[in-house]
Amino acid sequence: MSLQVVTANRLGDGLVVFLTADGGWSESINDACTADGKEAANALLADASAPELDVIIVGPYLIDVEQQDSGLVPTKYREVLRTKGPSVREDLGYQAV
């Protein structure tokens, strides 16, 4: 099983966020807490699915990532797009910064 992180969307602005080791949420995938193995991944997802988080984030789920020299990188193209923003307008989203 590959490394996994929890991702969701922040309710305030809809941005993609990642669960951090301290239980917070970051816009950077490199701040995400990683899980190696099914039990660890399910524990992370359970933490992210706590009812009190329903006012902060929506739709938490696990994604597969790889550790590369540049940091954590999603293994699925859909998740790569979510971390970068719109693919048709490079002046928008994370790539515009």
Image (cartoon, rainbow, N blue to C red):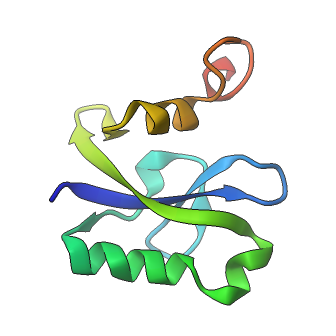
Name the spot of residue 51 as percent of width and height, x first: 68, 87
Residue found farthest to the right: 12
Q: Residue at horizontal 30%, vertical 47%? A: 65
- Residue ID at (23%, 36%): 68
Instruction: Using residue 76 as the reference point, say whether residue 13 is left or right of it.
Output: right
Number of labels in the image equals: 0
> What quarter of the picture does the N terminus occupy?
bottom left
Q: Where is residue 73 in the image (x, y as percent from the top left)?
A: 34, 38
**Residue plotted at (70% across, 66% down):** 57
Q: In which quarter of the image is residue 55?
A: bottom right
Q: In this view, does 72 lie to the left or right of 89?
A: left
> 58 left or right of 19?
right
In x, y percent, where is residue 53? Answer: 69, 79
Q: In this view, does 62 lie above or below 54?
A: above
Q: In this view, does 21 lie above or below 77?
A: below
The foreground one among 28 and 87 is: 87
Q: In which quarter of the view is residue 94 placed? A: top right
Q: In this view, does 72 lie above or below 6?
A: above
> Residue 97 falls in which quadrant of the image?
top right
Q: Residue furthest bottom?
A: 51
* Direction from residue 21 to residue 14 in the image, left or right: right
Q: Which residue is drawn at 61% across and 17% down?
A: 87
Which one is in front, 96 or 84? 84
- In x, y percent, where is residue 66? 24, 43
